[in-house]
Image: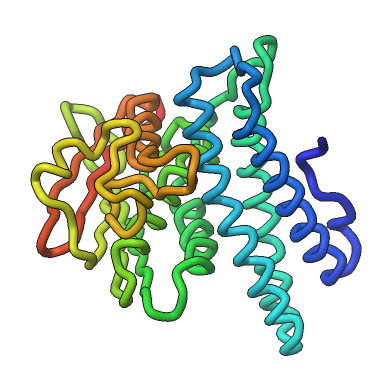
Amino acid sequence: MSLSPSGLDVDLAAAVHAYAGWASAVGVELQTTTASSTPYCAITEIERRAAVHDLRNILQVISSGVRLTQIRMAKGQTNEAHQMCARLASCVENANVLAASIFMDRQQEPLSAPDVELAELLHDAAFCFSWILGPTIKLSLHVADNLAPIRCVEAELQHALLNLVINARDAMPDGGAIALTAARAIAHDDEGVVLHIRDSGHGMSPEIAARAFEPYFTAKADGTGLGLGLGLGLGLGLGLGLASVASFVKKVGGEIEIERSAPTGTSMMIFLPAAT
C-alpha cells in the first residue's frame, strides 16, 4: 500500500479528508501487520514491535489533528486550519519514517542522521503534542538560545518525545502539567543538549523506576496511567514506551535518567551529544 496521502495540494477540505483517509488506511495495515506471522528480517522483533507502538502514537496525533482542523474549518478559522494542516504534513512524514522501518526489507539502507536544530523541532513538536492532551493538561516549553545541533534522525527524536508526553498525560487523568525544557550542557567533557521532561502525576515507586527501561515491563495490565517511565499499552508493544526512548538515546550516544518520581510526579533527564 502507499504510505503517503494524495491530493494534499488541493483545497484545505480535501487535504484534511486525505489525511483522515491515510490515517485510517495505515491503521488497517497495522492490524494486518501485528496479526501476521511473516518474519521481518531487516530488524529485530522487539524493534518492529517498538516501531508499531510508536506509529500508533503518532496516528493518535494525526487523528486528533484532523479532528481539530475540521473544527477550525467549521468555525471559519481558515488561517489556523492551514497552520494545523501544515503540521499534519510533518506528522505524516514522521509516520512514514516509522512505517518504513516496519515494512522495510533486508536490502534497504539505514536512515541517515543529519544535524538537527532542536529549537524549531521542539516548538513544532509541542504544537502537535497539544492536540492529544485535552483541556485539563497544560504543556509548557522553554528552549534556551544557541543550542548545539544534534546528529540524529529527526523523526526518531520526535517519537521519543511523544512517547514521554503520552505517558505523562496518562499519569494525570484528572489534569496537570507537563514541562519540557532544553538547554546547553556538558557531560563527560562532551558538549550537547540536556532535555528535561517533567509531569505532575503520581510518579513511580523506586521499585518500578528501577525497571522502567526494561522492554515489556509495565505495572498495570492495560499499561496506561503510569507516567513517563512506562510504555503506553496498546496491545502489541505493551511496556515498550520508555524502552524505545532509551534505545534511541543510546543510539545517538546520549544518556537518560529518571531524576525524580513518586510522590511528586516524574522527571526525566535526557542528554544528547552535539554533532561533531
166 lies left or right of 131: left
- The quadrant in which residue 208 appears is top left
Residue shown at the point (30%, 68%) measured from the top left:
172
Give percent across and percent down for residue 184: 27, 46
Quadrant of image for the C terminus: top left
Give percent across and percent down for residue 210: 14, 37
Quadrant of image for the N terminus: top right
43 lies left or right of 218: right
- Which is more toward the observer, 202 or 36? 36
Q: Is residue 184 visible?
A: no
Using the image, determine if residue 40 lies above or below residue 187.
Answer: above
Residue shown at the point (29%, 50%) measured from the top left:
220
Q: Is residue 42 visible?
A: yes
- Which is more toward the observer, 113 or 216? 216
- Which is more toward the observer, 122 or 46? 46
Report the colour scheme.
rainbow
